[in-house]
Amino acid sequence: MRRTRAILVNTLPPLAFLIVFFFLPLVVLLLYSFWRMDAGVLRQQFTLANYLDVFREPVYVPLLIKSVVIGIGAMLATLAIGYPLAYFIRFHGGRHRNALLMLVILTMLSSYLVRVYAWKAILGNNGILNSFLMHVGLIEEPLTFLLYSNSAVLFAFIQIFTPFIVLPVYSAMANIDDSLLEASRDLGASPLTTFLRVTLPLSKPGVIGGGLLAFILIAGDFVTPTLVGGVDGIMIGKTIQSQFGFAYNWPLGSAVAFSMLALMAVVGGLWALVVNLLLPTAGGER
Amino acid sequence: MRTPWHLWRGLARAPLTAYALLAYAFLFFPSVVIILFSFNQSKVTVWPPRGFTLDWYGEILRDPTLLESIANSLIVASLATIGSVILGTMAAIALSRYYFRGKRLVYAAMLAPIALPGLVTGIAMLSYFEYLGLQRSLATVILAHIVFTLPFVVTIVIARLSDFDPAVEEAALDLGASPLRSFLTVTLPIIAPSVAGAALVVFALSFDEFIITFFVIGNQSTLPLKIWSMMRLGIAPTINAVASIIIVLSTILVLIGTRFVRVAGR
């Protein structure tokens, strides 16, 4: 009795809160995607017209694909930076391990908007990088391709989302028992073999989870493309945001949003599958 | 057998260390640049910085709309922190202490808000409030912030509770303490550091939040929204100053916060 009561008392309020303010809103958003804007007025009648529009109108499908490509590209780049960094902290951090990890947490929790802004200030035509290069005499005219391009967007994404890889990969690596590595060594495995057969397979959950999180957050972002992407660097999130802003077509906007989520789920599932197939399985596992 | 390993560690260490240093430099580069230029005398943010001034920080104090947005952000972050910490701690207690049917589902539900892009959470709440005919205001922002910070509280507090022996609490109950009393005198003191740590992290997250806030706010402005509207007008030195304050403030909060918190997997 005491136990049942304790479970109910503790789970019901947070659960009810999330249902009312998170899950129900998602249901309403889904409803909107089946309604229709008719001459500026919302018609609450079921229709698939918005989803058909997503496929019929020439903007959305290419932008969906582009956002997924940028999301995967930036995610792989964050892995290329974040995985070795997590490895370094875990296996070579020594007694500074916690401090090193803290530095990464700091960058993750420090203002997202401020960091995008910083890239805008750095990469702008009259920005810090251009004026620096001109100051030291490397260039005469500002490089105009730095800001408002896909590469600027990619660059900002990589810097902003690398910590999202480091933490899950680190915590997967932190769970690797040192005795496993010693055992591998004592059995005569080369360091590379140990890495490939023990460390890499056991850090797989971090790679899958961190990669997935980074991919979802990057592919669905609208702030970075708006601030540093300009016209060229537009992504699907920006079109959703404008449907909920001045374009004022919420039903179409939510249909685009759910199409994006569906695509993300497919890509995320494939990602887990591919990582599981490509990365070796731990020796003795299964 | 030992030699190759030491050789490997030595050999692997140098490039790996260099790589890690570069990665850290890359991660901190933008923040450092912004702080550096917040003291720049010139009106334009170009290299090289000229002179040293605190004028841009003074500008903040002379801009009433900016001050108001800071006040709004403080209100939102404080109330969202209280709500999120209470609800999140309750969930963490239930999830770490008891086994019950549907527990995995409840856990997944608690973490769900992190797994969705902020944009989707934002437009979902916007549609919902509109559908219900609810006026958007700072109150709706607070509700939204509780939703998106809840997973952080749950994860941080669960990490602490997992190495806490429930027998201690059982003992209090068996000795006749009421559940509330046993919570207040036994459980809370033990989990207090991680709850405090979670509170500071949540405060920093809420103070900075932009994407969801953008959709669910009414006429007022929080600091990130104010920065957004300033940024659309261009790069101004005052933004450098505000941004620096945010960077330093969230750094301090997170530093203190994580001191209380068991770091992942350790």
Image (cartoon, rainbow, N blue to C red):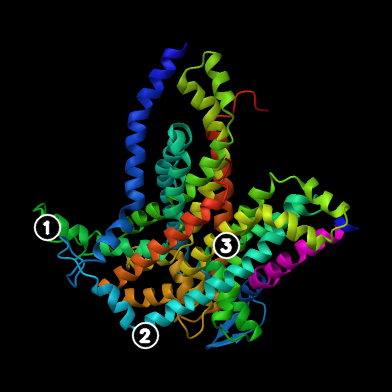
Which sits in the foreground, B149 or A68?
B149
* Nearer the camera: disc 1 or disc 2: 2
| Residue A57, placed above or below residue A167 | below
Q: Amino acid at mark 1?
A: Met
How many marks overall? 3
Label 3: how many Cα within 10 Å (few below 14, some 14–19, many 20+):
many
Name the amino acid, label 3. Ala
SS label for mark 2? helix
* Residue tagged 1: A134
Task: Count residues near mark 2 (Cα–Cα under 10 Å), then give few for <14, some for 14-19, many for 20+.
Answer: few
Q: Quarter of the image holding residue B125? A: bottom right
For the residue pair B16 and A36, the one nearer the viewer reads as B16
Q: Position of residue B24 (x, y in %)?
A: 36, 46
SS state under label 1:
helix
- Where residue B156 appears, as percent x and y from the top left, is 61, 53
The answer to whether residue A126 is above or below residue A93 is below
Mark 2: which amino acid?
Answer: Pro
Q: Gap between marks 2 and 3, in whole Å?
A: 29 Å
Q: In the image, which disc is placed on residue B64?
A: 2
Where the N terminus of chain A falls, by quadrant? bottom right
The reply to whether the C-beta atoms of the residues labelled 3 and 1 are less than 8 Å apart is no
Q: Is residue A255 visible?
A: no
Q: Earlier in the sequence, mark 2 or mark 3?
A: 2
Horizontal placement of B68 versus A261: left or right? left
- Measuring from the top left, give residue B138's x and y in whole percent: 54, 80
Element type where label 3 sits in the image: helix
Q: Which residue in the structure is indicated by mark 3?
A: B199
Please indicate whether residue B232 sits to the left or right of residue B221 in the image.
left
Magenta stretch? A4-26
